[in-house]
């Protein structure tokens, strides 16, 4: 019998081809995420789970699924999964790194352009019938050319953002857990700076670091007050990296000029104080939302899960320490 797999949301069908060929696949819904109760009911009969970052896969959920052999996350980040609990049970966890770099970098630039040039405000201005003609002082924004861009977290996506900054002739500062090598700094035109120095010097600060306990509310009231009053904050990383209440207060008080947010601390909820502000652009987590990227993510997540369930090494593995014991157990069960 083919392994039974639950896919928690409808994905681009082209990406599921290999999974359907090698597994018995149930797609929960195209309309909504499964509830906690529904996952607790559906998962016990499954050998594999392909979930999204909106699914909280914790110790309790994993514990009720005695047949579960692998978890494939349709995302690069995996803070929605209790990886320690999966590892204790010998379950491989996979993710989809690399394939959404370009799309997310482009989204960061889209937010940068939208908020600094007040595009969304202008759109509302026209649609509301308030535009009576060209005016020299109407909706003045900030040019990016020649300004300083600060990148917080300089992995694949951060580097892709830096690469595009060259076209705007921007100076690029970055901070990272580990400083990059000199060759990479030279190639991308990067200058290393401590976080506080970066915040004080940058005209735009763009966040690209993973979420972890030590990055929770990294950008808080104190950090926001270190930024220029003319500066902008862009977040396409994880919502909880920013203290949303502190950000709303800083925007309302004019402590910073504006923000562009694609992620939120309690998605899909947004801090209510942000909703009424004109100087923030709010997007519904569109960072990877291109047909090309979402299809590649589906392909990678599907291939990862199919391979693990058939005893083959996946394209990416979050907890490689489980692989040797997993493959030994798999081969024993297959009579190999």
Image (cartoon, helix red, strand yellow):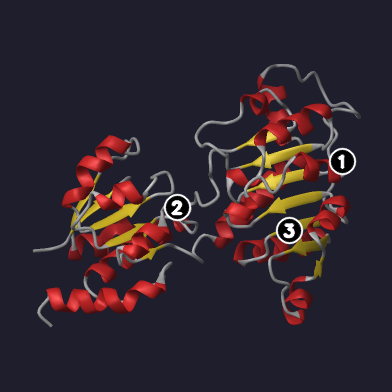
Q: State the CA–CA distance, disc 1 to disc 2.
A: 35 Å
Residue shown at 53% from the left, 36% from the top: 266
Residue 218 vs 303, above or below: the answer is: above
Quickly name the residue at label 2.
291
| Of pointers 1 and 2, the one earlier in the residue sequence | 1
Query: Alpha-carbon neighbours of circle 2 within 10 Å: few (<14), some, or many (≥20)?
Result: few
Tell which of 200 and 183 is nearer to you: 200
Quickly name the residue at label 3.
151
| Of pointers 1 and 3, the one earlier in the residue sequence | 3
Q: Which mark is residue 230?
A: 1
Quadrant including the N terminus: bottom left
Residue 333 position, x and y percent, is 13, 73
Residue 177: name its quadrant.
bottom right
| Of pointers 3 and 2, the one earlier in the residue sequence | 3
Tell which of 102 and 137 is nearer to you: 102
| SS state under label 2 | helix
Residue shown at 27% from the left, 35% from the top: 37
């Amino acid at each position: 019998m083919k392994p039974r797999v639950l896919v928690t949301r409808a994905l681009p069908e082209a990406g599921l081809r290999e999974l359907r060929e090698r597994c018995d696949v149930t797609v929960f819904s195209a309309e909504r995420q499964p509830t906690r109760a529904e996952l607790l009911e559906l998962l016990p009969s499954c050998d594999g789970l392909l979930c999204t970052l909106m699914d909280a896969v914790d110790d309790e959920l994993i514990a009720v699924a005695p047949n579960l052999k692998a978890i494939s996350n349709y995302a690069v980040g995996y803070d929605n999964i209790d990886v320690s609990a999966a590892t204790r049970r010998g379950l491989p966890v996979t993710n989809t790194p690399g394939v959404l770099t370009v799309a997310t970098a482009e989204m960061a630039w889209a937010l940068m352009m939208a908020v600094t040039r007040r595009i969304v405000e202008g759109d509302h201005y026209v649609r509301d019938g308030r535009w009576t003609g060209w005016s020299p002082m109407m909706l003045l924004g900030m040019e990016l050319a020649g300004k300083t861009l600060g990148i917080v977290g300089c992995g694949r996506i951060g580097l892709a953002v830096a690469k595009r900054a060259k076209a705007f002739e921007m100076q690029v500062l970055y901070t990272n857990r580990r400083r990059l090598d000199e060759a990479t700094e030279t190639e991308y035109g990067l200058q290393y700076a401590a976080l506080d120095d970066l915040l004080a010097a940058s005209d735009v600060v763009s966040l690209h670091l993973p979420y972890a306990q030590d990055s929770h509310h990294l950008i808080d009231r104190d950090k926001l007050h270190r930024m220029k009053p003319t500066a902008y904050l862009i977040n396409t990383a994880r919502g909880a990296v920013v203290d949303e209440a502190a950000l709303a207060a800083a925007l309302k008080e004019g402590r910073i000029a504006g923000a562009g947010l694609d992620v939120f601390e309690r998605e899909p909820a947004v801090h209510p104080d942000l909703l009424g502000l004109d100087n923030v652009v709010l997007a519904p987590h569109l960072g990877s939302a291109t047909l090309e990227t979402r299809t590649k993510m589906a392909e990678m997540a599907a291939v990862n899960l199919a391979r693990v369930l058939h005893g083959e090494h996946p394209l990416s593995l979050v907890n490689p320490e489980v692989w040797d014991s997993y493959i030994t157990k798999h081969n024993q069960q297959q009579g190999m």
